[in-house]
Image (cartoon, rainbow, N blue to C red):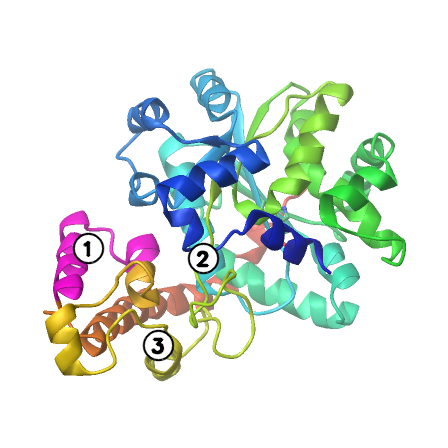
Amino acid sequence: MSWLKLFMKEAKVTPWEVSGEVDYSKLIKKFGVSEIDGSLLKKLSKKGNLHFMLKRKVFFAHRDLDFALEELDKKNLFLYTGCGPSGPIHLGHAMVWHFTKWLQDTFGVELWFQFTDDEKFLFKKKSYKEIQEWLYENMLDVIALGFNPKKTHFLIDTKHASLMYPEAIKVAKKLTGSAVKASFGLTDSNNVGELFYTSMQAVPAFLPSVIKKKKMACLIPHAIDQDPHFRLTRDILPKLGYYKPASIQCSFLPQLKGAKGKMSSSEGNAIYLTDSPKEVERKIRKYAFSGGKETMKEHREKGGDPDVDVSFQYLRMFFEPDDKKLQKIHDDYKSGKLLTSELKEYLIKKINTFLKEHQRRREKAKKQINKFIYKEK
Ligand code: TRP
């Protein structure tokens, strides 16, 4: 069983279960992360207009976010996130990076963006060449999301090996095989690269401190499934003389079919940033799990259930920033005034507007890649 499956099974992390108050706290307890509470939201709101993903608890958990904000005030903070290039980028990734861009713009800080081509080569049944092709494609999407080229540095694990490897082995020396196995559910039959890999994911959390020769704080925006990596990283970095990285964590954007799990790449599960408007329409109409009733008559009488309705959840988590509009959609769907087909129509338009602009920028990104890849001074 993969560590992600193990993680999901133990934590019962599903979009539905993490959306209720009770289960939030269960999850938070189980993983030892903290909830982003009112006082933290207040501190965050002093940095800029609170993002709706914070208000709506899409980003709901953290480690040491208070510390990160203090270091931000001392101009001693950077952001770090990453992408494992093994397939097309879907809306679930875009949601995390959209918020990361907001953090970068609002905090005015550098972002270190790791592309883990080593990870995906080691963990997936794909050739090195295929992974390199996805690396290129994925970089275009990340650039197209609008990160500031002056403040964003791409680190590619195999391309920046001479910079990263000396730091990764310092982490690896403090990490036992049994710790890795326990954290990720790996066994003796996993390849040795898989056991080593988490050492590479730890590196960007302190590499800027190495490069700038000063001890800096790091804040990592990520989906909650990446927490095991950073739990290990947090144990080790103080032993190497660095701060523990802080994190701000979100729940998963549900897959289209609404079954348990996060949006991932198999038919009927995901919408890609490269999908055509027709494809988006087809996928939403065919697959997006509906909280509506069987017949129109019944729906008009009893109303739908927005909490399990994937289209509504996409609006809540990503595509409808306007609180008032969202509330109205919620209420109208619940009362039966708004039909599933109308709700889907609204979402399709929202997604296609977003993708049209994204795909235009994605073409332009082909000329910008060089500006983003980190160059050693
Ligand atoms: N392991 C992540 C993935 O599989 C990629 C990644 C590397 C990452 N560093 C990160 C994600 C930091 C979030 C934050 O996609």
Which quadrant of the figure contains the N terminus?
bottom right
Residue 259, how many percent across, how many down? Answer: 47, 67
Q: Amino acid at mark 2?
A: Ala
Residue 270 vs residue 16, the one in the foreground: 16
When asked about the image quadrant of residue 60, the answer is top left
Q: Amino acid at mark 1?
A: Leu
Residue 251 to residue 307: above or below: above
Q: Nearer the viewer, mark 2 or mark 3?
A: 3
* Image mark for residue 94: 2
- What is the CA distance from the residue labelled 2 to the residue labelled 3? 17 Å
Query: Looking at the image, is mark 2 or mark 3 earlier in the sequence?
Result: 2
Residue 259 to residue 49: above or below: below
Decide if residue 208 is on the left or right side of residue 337.
right
- Residue at 65% x, 18% y is 214
Residue 266, how many percent across, how many down? Answer: 56, 75
Q: Residues within 10 Å of mark 1 (few under 14, many from 20)?
A: some
Identify the secondary structure beneath mark 3: helix
Residue 360 to residue 189: above or below: below
Evaluate whether residue 149 shows in this view.
yes
Give the residue number, with chain letter if any, for mark 3.
284
When asked about the image quadrant of residue 32, the answer is top right
| Dominant secondary structure of the residues highlighted in magenta in the image | helix
- Judge: label 1 CB < 8 Å from ligand 1: no
Whether residue 94 appears in magenta in the rendering, the answer is no
Which residues lie in the magenta part?
315-335
Give the residue number, with chain letter if any, for mark 1.
326
Query: Looking at the image, is mark 2 or mark 1 earlier in the sequence?
Result: 2
- What is the CA distance from the residue labelled 2 to the residue labelled 1? 20 Å
Circles 1 and 3 in contact, beta carbons < 8 Å:
no
